[in-house]
Image (tube, coloured by chain):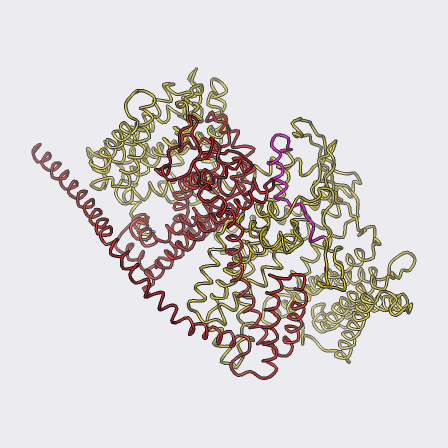
Chain colours: A yellow, B red
Amino acid sequence: MSDAYAHDQKATLVSGDADYYDRALDVAIAVAALNFLLGLATLVGALGLETTGPALTDLMAGVAVAGVGGVGLVAAFTALNVVAIPSQRVRGLGVGLVAGLALLTTLSTVPSVDLGALLGAVLVLDGLAVGLAGIISRIGVVDTEPNASAGALAGLLFGGVGFVLGVALNGLVLDGVPVVLTGLLVAAALVLLTVLPREDLGSTLPAALIVSLLGIIVVGSVVDAGWTWTPTEPMNGGLTGGVVVSLFVVLGSLLAGWAAAKARARYGARGRQYGSFLVIYLNATLTVIVMISIVTFVAIRGLHYTFHGFTIGALSGLVVLSPVLVAALAYARRPAGAPDWNSGVRQIVRVLPLATVGAVAALLVAVVIRGEPFVHRFTYRIMESRQEQALETAFTVTPELTVGTLIVAIPGSVLFAYFYRKYGSLTGVGRSFDRQSAVQRGLGLAVAAVLTLAVVFLLGGPQPFGLPLGKTIGFGGVVVASVAAAVLAVVAVGGLLAGDGTLAERARRNAQFVKVGLFGGLGVVLAATLLQPTTTTTPSVGGVDLLPAAAAVGAMAGLVVAAVATLARRATGTDDAEQRLMGRLLAEEIRLGLVAATGFVVLIVGHVATTDSPFSVAGLTVSDGGTLSWPMVMFSAIPLGAEPGGILPAVVGTVWIVVGASLFAIPLGVGAAVFLTEYAEQGRFTALVEITTNALWSTPSVVFGLFGAAFLIPRLGDTPSLMAAMITLGFMLLPLVLITSREAIKSVPDEYRNASAALGVNRWETIRSVVLPAAVPGVVTGVILGVGRIAGETAPLILVLGVGDAGQSVDVLGGFQFITEPPFVYNGALLEASKALPKQVWAVIAAGVSGSPSKGWGTALLLLAVVLSFYLVGILTRRYFRRKLDYE
Amino acid sequence: MTNGIQRRIREGLIERFRALVGVVTALANRAGQWLLALPGRMAQMVFTLPARIERTLLTLPGRAWRWLVGAKRVFVGSEPTPGETLVGLSSVVTIVGVGYTFLGPNDLVAYPLAGFIVTVTVGWWTHQARVAKIMTAVATVGTVLTVGFITYFLFRSAWPAFQEHGLALAALPQGPNGRVRWFFGLDAVLPVTGGETAWDPRGGVVSLLPAIWATVIVTIIAGLVAAPLGLLGALFIAEIASESVREIVKPAVEILAGIPSIVYGFIGFQVLNGFVQGAFLDAGASFFIAGTVVGLMALPTVVSVSEDALSSVPASMSDGAIAMGATEWQTMKSISIPAAFSGISAAVILGLGRAIGETMAVAAIMGAGTGFARPLFDVFDQGVTLTSRIATSYGSASSGTIDILFVAGVLLFVIVATISVIAQYIERRMQRKLTGER
């Protein structure tokens, strides 16, 4: 379809006689768009309507230079045939923009013209252009294809505008005439003017009249920046000139742009399409702009407060950067598409993130090498208890080579999971060595035995039955495990390099050594890491703890394996099938090496976290405290002085609420979805459940809060508590989980189920191994988006969470107690009130003028970051899975 | 020559006028028919009511029996082995025990819960398929019960207030001159509070009517913002945008939905109130801002639901239009939008439901107000909506006042649930029509 139109457009749009008409209208459209944007800028106060004289000339010249530069660059590349712009309309708009900018700049040099008058003048000119276009078309100077009438929709639109105009005129000029009467009269006149004449006049003349009228009002200073209007006594509010002028400009430009676009496309069906598409595109753009500006606005307002006194060690920065590096690598590896003119550009775009990561990493390393901290000082003002004060603080990167456990654990686990998912299998590759199965079984048994010991000591204490066994057994076990792990690591690397032939051949032949060595080491160290804290021993030699040393050796071994395999892979060509197969096997080995390296690093962190003893190797230190200091997030409330207060209790509270709600809602929702879709007969009952869950999903959150207050609080100790908040929000999450899971399970094709049934697999096995895995993407996406929504919920928390202690975060993990009477497990922390991020923002609002807006912005920024990261992950997951499904 | 043109113009005018008259008469005709048929339809409903109730009562035992059989099939299966029966019965007993103890003597809940966990754990090893089915069934029952509990506990907590205050919950406050306010003629029916204020629980004035009216105003403004913008956005995403542009706009709309309402409220409280003070010479906090912000928040709902509706119009319909040489806009205007009209209206209704239930943004932007907007339609006045009444008054309320807040909760719950059910009904009808199923 579009091809046919493109052809058509060429035929009619480039015809010589209509060229001036087209160009003039292109200018009109471009100027209208420009005017619209400038009007919006004055509406939100970014530009002052009273700008005049040289300042105005400077402003317009700046806008003009920017516009000409933008259009010029595109035009240059188009002229060089690098960028293809076949559409005459787009070309025309570019030229129109330049012409319009020149016009505006010229006008702005007229002395005593202010921005408002300038915009008004443009409105008048646009109105004239549109009206003229209509008349020219009606008398047949240009070839157009207008319909008999502009149509009821346009009539209605102009009628509405006319009504408002009539009412306004009544207020401005007439007195004593009923408001509605004038409104209706003007509206009727405009409707008739729109509907009765042929389309070319009907859609341009009323627009031209209205736009010119608005322009004249503005230019003639009937309404200017100093103008005000207040309604008669009982009404509130009123209008100021600033807002009225801006609104006139915005609405007038919209109308003029629409009419000009219609005229440019020769009226008729195509003219209507161009006109309405202009409006639709504008709407979509505005939506995106609103979204972006809300997020940026909150970020700008909250950034200073949030990053007050932020300090991070260079090594911590590098560690945090590592998942970004992997993501950037994955992005850069994607093929750039066919080698046509723009694949080069695409390749540059692909490697840009990677280059950025490299730049940041290099800067961090430079800090380490220089040995001096990088300090970015900044000052900002806050309002606290109605007093404005300036705070001086800095963002610092220190050259310390110490990193905290949490900072390693999170990226480490993410990378471990990522590589493990990517890693397939090396089973059956290369030759199997003697007694391989025996070694594998032995390792498995040993790991199981150590784990059992760990459980025994956990339950019975380090001295079960009064026997002082713990220390001895633990010591021996950990020493043996450490030595075994180190040996296994050496086996892996040695095995990889042993024998003769090319590096690749050796790597393939000895794949089993690598596999057993690395995985065995991981298992052994994992078991020993769990044994250590339960027996309260940390064997060390010469001040160095044995276990993390072994793990470090393992991590090095993993890296060596990955490096060697990468070298070998590089030396292997991709010419024939044999070589490509070799390449794939080596890629598996690379991933295996990375799995082991990340796994061992996570285990080192586990050791540090469980034994509280820092571990250093080659100047790098992993310690409990770390070098990240983020006062806003990591400190509890500090009485205000030089430092702004922290909100750790709120962060912790929100985390626990989200965890609790998910634990409650996800199993229940997914279970119900499985029953309703797979077991229950599709009929009245399922339809009823569907309707009620949908109704539940749209139930206002504050009603859930009331329910929690009436139902849960009396059953949970009669006070607002964390637990009540968890379950209340769980109830809110439940319908969404149910709805999305049901959708996902329903969309699994019936062929899957039938194929499984044909193989003789029973219902449950089919669900477990066929239906659920296929439905997981949908369920996961839905759950993530739902959790994001829950995390920002405020209203129910006001009712069920209580006030909480600003100086102390809830200690849920430490609150568990086992008692002998029901309910056997008791957790005092869950039954306490707590803080939460959204409530913290509400507290600032509720405090009124005595609240601290800067703290509110900071908290809002954090909350937004938390919620939007859920959304981002959800959207990316969905896109990832959709791509995967599409490729299949 | 001139005569010819004049005649043509005259004929054209007459032609258009005739067409207009035709459309108007057709519309009036249909409305008249519908109105005429209305009493008959209502009478039919009333007359058939006893028969329907009777039928329901008569079939009740049979239905109950079928339910029991169904439950037995779920928990034990049709041809159970002894082990299966044991697992099934044991889980039924324990789960019923959990339910009973949770609602009643709730410190005993640990015992049946432990029993259920043990049953399920053991059963997982011995009869996995059965236990899986039981557990999913329990999850379903739990979900359904949630709905029941919410309804029951809301109404039960609100009941004392209904009993105590009755119609005083909808009392009209007096105007500044001591006269009763005009309120759509209802002022003749409703009781009147002692003074101008409508909310002063300590003084015994507990009218929710201004809050209801405030909710209506906010919802109307929000609808005016969200409906047209939402429809345009949905058209863009469903019909116009290319794949790559859609990948940007759709997440942007979703993120707009994801921004927490308290953040919207905070922006409104900190920034928009000040803007309105400057631009509209107003005290700041007003229905206008609250409605606009809530409309922005309802926008994503409208966009995504109407986009679904537009995408579910069969491609064959629009292909047909395009084959006739229609432009894209003509296709949208004359094929897609009319075909998806009911879905789009469902989207708008759902968006209104969201707007009614929005709490924190409204509470943050408009803090106070105890009476009606003055005059009734003044969007630059401020007031408290049903939701923000609950959120702002709950913390400091006495138990009697809390009961009244529950009345507000019941109102919200019933209104929004009705809206949701209506929207779903419309959507289903549209699906049936489009797919041709009955």
With respect to residue A730, does A256 lie above or below? Answer: above
Where residue A344 appears, as percent x and y from the top left, is 53, 50
Q: Choose top left, top right, bottom left or bottom right for residue B102.
A: bottom right
Side (left or right) of A765 relative to A448: left
Q: Is residue A832 magenta?
A: yes
Horizontal placement of B314 versus B215: left or right? Answer: left
Q: Is residue A471 left or right of residue A610?
A: right
> Which residue is outermost to the front?
B164
Task: Choose top left, top right, bottom left or bottom right for residue A311.
Answer: top right
Q: Quadrant of the N terminus of chain B?
A: top left
Residue A855 point in image, percent of width and height: 65, 36
Q: Which residues are magenta?
A: A829-853
Asked if residue A80 is positioned above or below residue A506 in the image, the reply reads: above
Residue situated in front as seen by the camera: B185 or B84? B185
Q: Position of residue A774 (x, y in %)?
A: 53, 67
Q: Specify whether B54 is left or right of B27.
A: right
Residue A99 inside the magenta-drawn segment: no
Residue A82 visible in this rendered orientation of the protein: no
For the stretch drawn in magenta, the main secondary structure is helix
For the image shown, how many numbered marks are present on the structure?
0
> What's the residue at 38%, 71% (across, down)?
B58
Front one among B298 and A70: B298
Q: Quadrant of the C terminus of chain B?
A: bottom left
**Where does residue A214 sit, x and y in percent of width and height?**
34, 26
Q: Nearest the camera: A491 or A707?
A: A707
- Whether residue A184 appears in this view of the structure is yes
Q: Residue furthest top?
A: A111
